[in-house]
Amino acid sequence: MAAATGLLGTDGQVRPTIFAEMSALANRTGALNLGQGFPDTDGPAQVARAAADAILAGHNQYPPGAGIPALLDAVAAHQRRCYGLELDPADQVLITTGATEAIAAAVMALVGPGDEVLTLEPFYDSYAAVIALAGAVHTTVALVPGPGGFRLDETALRAAVTDRTRLILLNSPHNPTGTVLTRAELTSIAAVAREHDLLVVTDEVYEHLTYGATHVPIATLPAMAERTLTVSSSGKSLSFTGWKIGWISGPATLVTAVRTVKQFLTYVSGAPFQPAVAGALVDPQVAAWVADLAASLSRRRDLLCEGLERAGFTVVVPQGTYFVLADAAPLGFDDGAALCRALPALAGVVGVPASAFTRSGSATDAALASWIRFTFVKQTQVLTDAVERLGRWATTGRAGGAP
Ligand SMILES: *Cc1c(COP(=O)(O)O)cnc(C)c1O
């Protein structure tokens, strides 16, 4: 059964993800790790202090199944303040073990064998795995690179929907492209969802990490709140990715369905972190800290993008998230995965091939074969060093072309 989902290798061993493989390579070679997307600086000290205080104050046993009331209230207040979305914290919000569990539980709750789940492609790697675990069929619509970024084409979207499509699993701001879907793109998606009576699960973990572009939750579009589950998390916004406090919100019937699955995945988690995140979500000082983080990331984005371009990559400048996709084809490399395995030795830098986010054999897989994802959620000095190493490799070390 598990083997049939493709999650196990043929030898029955756990197959390491490309992220783990690349991080191990970085550790082994001392290369600068711009592969895995986790911050190398922690979130606000007062939020960390609140979690430490919560442990000492005895918040160490199972919290309520839906999450602690203060956090349910804080998520509802956040959605109202930021987007004008009205949610009843009593039955329209659920706290989860990161966005990852929210997405997994939602997919398992809403689809089964024979159903199709449509995602953008490239896509965050857990999507394909949970769709497979649910026994459903994964279909995709491409985000296509151009001068305006990686964009969604409405004709392609319509062509990707069939009478078996049940769910659109969306992600904006989008990892790995950095696309922030425009209101026009979201309006097309919403129209398709309404016409075909589809549910939408939207992964908005980078909602606060945008650079000039405005993040529009699809739940705010006309008649979409009733068919949309919105997912987010404290990991990316607060730079506490290890805390794994996420949430999902939407219509009570759908949230109840998700909770039914969630209670048999982890039941609950993060007792002392929940009050800390609850406080953070309603604290204007923390909101200012997050805005500063976005401003700082925007500068770090420019530093990395300009350096990659100087080294000879073609770069599509991201409008959100903390990733950039760069094409190595102009440098003479058509296999991004091979280049990623060689790059630590060649240049002392680690990235992740875009193929980690595509379905092998798809049109997007072919189109992005020579692309690499780099993260800029690293300290400025690390990015400066990485850019310098890549530049040196590109100008002096690349004689002969092939790795
Ligand atoms: C990091 C990430 C997640 C996982 O979030 P957690 O809260 O750590 O589970 C989900 N979706 C995307 C697009 C991400 O980049």
Image (cartoon, rainbow, N blue to C red):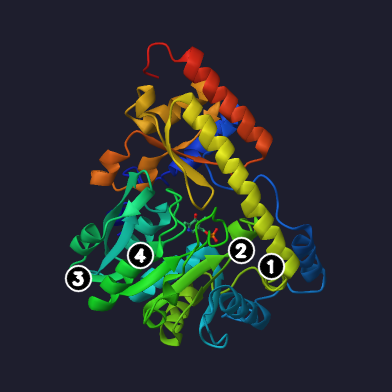
**Image mark for residue 273:** 1
State how far apart marks 4 and 2 are (Cα).
Answer: 28 Å
Among numbered discs 1 and 3, the one appearing first in the sequence: 3
Q: As shown in the figure, which amino acid type bears the numbered disc 4?
A: Ala
Mark 2, residue position: 234
Pick whichever, 363 or 31, lies toward us: 363
Question: Do the CB atoms of the residues marked 2 and 3 lie less than 8 Å apart?
Answer: no
Mark 3, residue position: 164
Judged left or right of residue 99, residue 182 is left
Mark 4, residue position: 184
State how far apart marks 2 and 3 are (Cα).
Answer: 34 Å
Q: What residue is drawn where x is 50% and y is 62%?
A: 214
Q: What residue is drawn where x is 57% and y is 23%?
A: 389
Pick whichever, 58 or 53, lies toward us: 53
Element at badge 4?
helix
Q: As shown in the figure, which amino acid type bears the numbered disc 2?
A: Ser
Instruction: Nearest to the eye among marks 1 and 3: give it.
Output: 3
State how far apart marks 2 and 1 are (Cα).
Answer: 10 Å
Judged left or right of residue 215, residue 46 is right
Instruction: Nearest to the eye among marks 4 and 2: give it.
Output: 4
Q: What residue is drawn where x is 49% and y is 51%?
A: 319
Q: What residue is drawn where x is 67% and y is 71%?
A: 281
Task: Mark 2: give few (<14), some (14-19) or many (20+) Cα within 10 Å.
Answer: many
Q: Is mark 2 within 8 Å of ligand 1?
A: yes
Where residue 363 appears, as percent x and y from the top left, is 23, 45
Pick whichever, 362 or 182, lies toward us: 182
